[in-house]
Image (cartoon, helix red, strand yellow):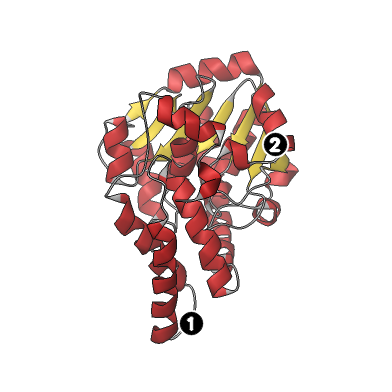
Amino acid sequence: MHSKLKTTPYTLYLIMNKRLFTVQPECFPCFLRQVIISLNQTDFDRERKIDIIKSTLEEVEKTDITTTPAHSTTFLHRKLRTLIGRDPFSEIKKRYNRIGLSLYQELKELVTGSDDPLFTATRLSIAGNSIDFGIYTSVDIESEIQRSLKEPLARDDYSLFRESLQKAGQVLYLLDNAGEIVFDRILIETLISLNIEVTAVVKGSPVINDATLEDATSTGIDRYAKVITNGSDCIGTILPWCSEEFKKVYNISPLIISKGQGNFETLYHDGERIFFLFQAKCDVVADFIGVKRGGMLLMKG
């Protein structure tokens, strides 16, 4: 097993907590699927791809099943980037940032023209969470937009969310994926229009198609909110692996918006000041929450 995971406060919490979210047997095919998706972003020949797959099996074998799937996939993607020799998702991130920006004006008009702009912006933010190349190989964004506006959420704590925002006055916004962050930009702009101060958080360095400072700048989020990094390349937000600077901001934030399934996996236990906005993209997460796979959620921690 990975020795780094044996003595962290996070691991001790997971072992002692009655409500564990840990690696399940169903996670292992997903680990390998993430390897294939990563390799599909390269032009490597068949033999080289197979060699890399075999090398990553060594990493899968080390999986610590007392931790979250996000812990294991963090190690897996670190090894993949080393074996591939670069960030395999660099170009597809830029592509989906461009796609998101091409939809920006239409989405913005949907929000400003609605009876409840915050409600609509929140739904669109959840729709954007479909842009996840750790799990999917393609995305029908237009269908996800329509689904988010028409279908009920599997968990809907919107009333509590709105009330908590009004009380807090400021938000730490944990961003998730490139492309998706254009949808988050619209929610951030909506929050700012309600006189709520927003600090947006990106990854410290590349991992899958998660947003970094480069993505936040290219999509204009830095023009509306202060943008910081969590100082890490971890999947989700694994607090012991984040920078001390980020942890200080995190610990004093009165309200946190957490985007994406990875952030849910790693932060679901961390108190009622967190609201999770995401789609349950796998059976393991859906079963843990008690919803159907694909369910959209705005859920208080």
Q: In the rendered view, would you say 47 is above or below 253?
A: below
> Which residue is tagged 2?
246
Amino acid on which disc 2 is placed: Phe
The disc at residue 110 is none
Secondary element at image label 1: loop
Q: Nearer the viewer, residue 272 or 72?
A: 72
- Asked if residue 109 is positioned above or below residue 95 in the image, the reply reads above
Which residue in the protein does label 1 denote? 43
> Where residue 93 sits: x, y (%)?
56, 62
Residue 295: % across, % down? 31, 38
Which of these two is toward me, 301 or 239? 239
| Residue 231 drawn at (x, y percent) | 68, 46
**113 left or right, relative to 233:** left
* Residue found 64% across the figure and 46% down from its top: 202
Residue depicted at 66% across the width and 19% down the height: 169
Q: Earlier in the sequence, mark 1 or mark 2?
A: 1
Left or right, 76 with reference to 196: left
Q: Amino acid at mark 1?
A: Asp
Mark 1–mark 2 CB contact (< 8 Å): no
| Front residue (pair 238, 93) | 238
Residue at point 44% right, 38% down?
265
Residue 80 in sight here: yes
Q: Would residue 139 be visible to someone looking at this image?
A: no
Residue 209 position, x and y percent, is: 53, 57
Relative to 181, is 50 on the left or the right? left
Alpha carbon of mark 1 to alpha carbon of mark 2: how far? 36 Å
The quarter of the displayed image where residue 255 is located: top right
**Comparing labels 1 and 2, the label whose residue is closer to the camera:** 2
Q: Residues within 10 Å of mark 1 (few under 14, many from 20)?
A: few
